[in-house]
Image: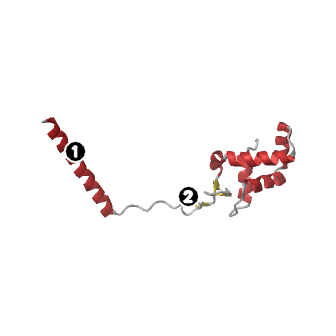
Amino acid sequence: MKKTLGMVVEDFLAKNKRKQYTAHEIAEGIMKVETEFCARKMQKTGKTEKILLFQLMSEIAGQYPKLLAFNIGRTEFKPFKYFYKVRAKKFGRYVNRTPAKPAAKPAAKKAVAKATVKKAVAKKAVRKAAKK
């Protein structure tokens, strides 16, 4: 099976769990580890190693939305650092995700529901008065 960039990046980051890397560091690591992938890419495009390094960097940064399917996360602020999302078996979700919003309290829910009902009743009364 032909390896894609997403597969190669996922393999690299999976071997180095709990560490964060910039796109440049990932590209350098791929150049060292995945020689067949890089040789095929150089042969296909006719580029040198230095140019291939910069191409890999830009592809990793540019294809981030596609890399989400490969369990790869990214920090929020620049310089962006990429990491492998470790799945917590106990909770069935990713460990590196932001926490969920806390649920609203039942008393607050009731107050909001009452306010919406009052608004609806008031609107109906205004409409009836406008028709007369």
Q: Label 2 is placed on what type of residue?
A: Arg
User: Dot 1 lies on which element?
Assistant: helix
> Going by the image, does 101 lie left or right of 35?
left
- Circle 1 packing at 10 Å, graded few (<14), some (14-19), many (20+), is few
Rendering coords of residue 55 (x, y %): 78, 45
Q: Secondary structure at mark 2?
A: strand
Q: Which residue shows up at 63% across the image and 49% down it?
A: 68
Q: How many marks?
A: 2
Comparing 24 with 6, the one in front is 24
Q: Give whichever of discs 2 and 1 has the lower sequence position.
A: 2
**Residue most toward the top?**
131
**Quarter of the figure with the N terminus:** top right
Q: Looking at the picture, which amino acid does disc 1 mark? A: Lys
- Residue furthest left in the image: 132
Disc 2 versus disc 1: distance between alpha carbons?
Answer: 44 Å
Residue 54 in the image: state x and y as whole percent. Answer: 79, 47
- Answer whether labels 2 and 1 touch (C-beta < 8 Å): no
Measured as percent of width and height from the top left, residue 26 is found at 75, 54
Q: Quadrant of residue 129?
A: top left
Residue 102 occupies quadrant: bottom left
Front: mark 2 or 1: 1
- Identified at 73% across, 53% down, the residue is 23
Q: Nearer the viewer, residue 42 or 47?
A: 47
Q: What residue is at 81 percent from the left and 49 percent from the top?
A: 53
Q: Tell me the residue at 32%/61% (across/down).
A: 108
Q: State left or right for residue 119 relative to residue 90.
A: left
Q: Which residue is mark 2?
A: 93
Q: Is residue 27 left or right of residue 94?
A: right
Which of 110/120 is in front?
Answer: 120
Q: What number is the disc on residue 123?
A: 1
